[in-house]
Amino acid sequence: MPHFFINSEIIDNNTVIISDTENYRHIARSLRAKVGEKLLLIDEKQIQYETEITEIDNSKIFAKIITSYPSKRFLDFELYLAQSPLRSDAQNFIIEKATELGVCGIIPVLTDNCTLNKSIIEKKISKWQKIMYESSKQCERAIIPRCFELSTLKEVLDSQKFDKIIVFCERIADKTIRDSFREKPIKPNDKILVIIGPEGGFSQNEFEFFEKEKLEMLTLGDLILRAETAVTVALGNIIYEYSNFNK
């Protein structure tokens, strides 16, 4: 069932009236939806609506609400990813998969070994935000995560307060996610930051920065993973361990 974001203000007497250009074109033109077909909608209050199209005219779609309920498509803790952007397809993959895995936001960070220069990254922010929007629709997310402006590692730590910060450093760390959870499990509503570097890894200066800030440095095992693989494995394992520790 197609999934679209709406504002609750367009609901009138159990009918959703869709008139914004983007949703209208997608539903009426791209999908060529017809009267009687179903639509899944979600509003800014994270209420999900199962609807049926009753009318389509030249500028509006009318859909009758069959049932509504609070969405469950979100984590019950806040998960953020600070990551050194990769080239084109690899970075698009990261943005898409991190969105599917429930992150609240992705923070591009400029690291010493980053493969992209600052100006290129800044131009890509809007494109990455659009990927997050489309991915959120496809996996029925309750909210659309945010792609933040480019930052340095220090700026990320100075600008926000996190309950737990995890840095993945394959070559120097020997502590695992499970070890970390045994010492300090994530609790509901905690704000968690995951930091992952570029293909070339973090520099010595950055390792010294992590040590100075007393950040937790973890490993994903003995295998050396590509950066885009490390992101999906790291986020997936954090969610898995959280679920086990909070049963």
Image (cartoon, rainbow, N blue to C red):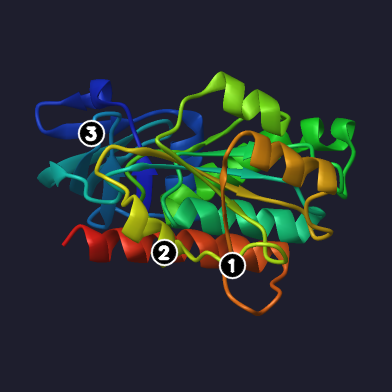
Query: Quarter of the image holding residue 209?
Result: top right
Which type of secondary structure does the marked residue at label 1 adopt? loop
Q: The disc labelled 1 sits on which kind of residue?
A: Asp
| 168 is higher (above) or lower (below) than 128 | below
> Which one is nearer the viewer's eye here, 162 or 136?
162
C-alpha span from label 3 to label 2: 49 Å
Counting every numbered tag in the picture gives 3
Q: The disc labelled 3 sits on which kind of residue?
A: Val
Indicate which disc residue 174 carries. 1
C-alpha span from label 2 to label 1: 10 Å
**Label located before the other in sequence (2 or 1):** 1
Which type of secondary structure does the marked residue at label 2 adopt? helix
Which type of secondary structure does the marked residue at label 3 adopt? strand
Q: Are marks 1 and 3 in contact (CB under 8 Å)?
A: no
Q: Give left or right: position of 12 versus 147.
A: left
The label nearer to you, 3 versus 2, is 2
Q: Residue at x 31, y 58 (%)?
A: 242
Q: Mark 2 — residue?
A: 179
Indicate which disc residue 16 carries. 3
Q: The disc labelled 2 sits on which kind of residue?
A: Asp
Image location (x, y in percent) of residue 69: 12, 44
| 162 is higher (above) or lower (below) than 198 | above
Q: Are marks 2 and 1 in contact (CB under 8 Å)?
A: no
**Label located before the other in sequence (1 or 3):** 3
Q: Residue at x 45, y 32 (%)?
A: 162
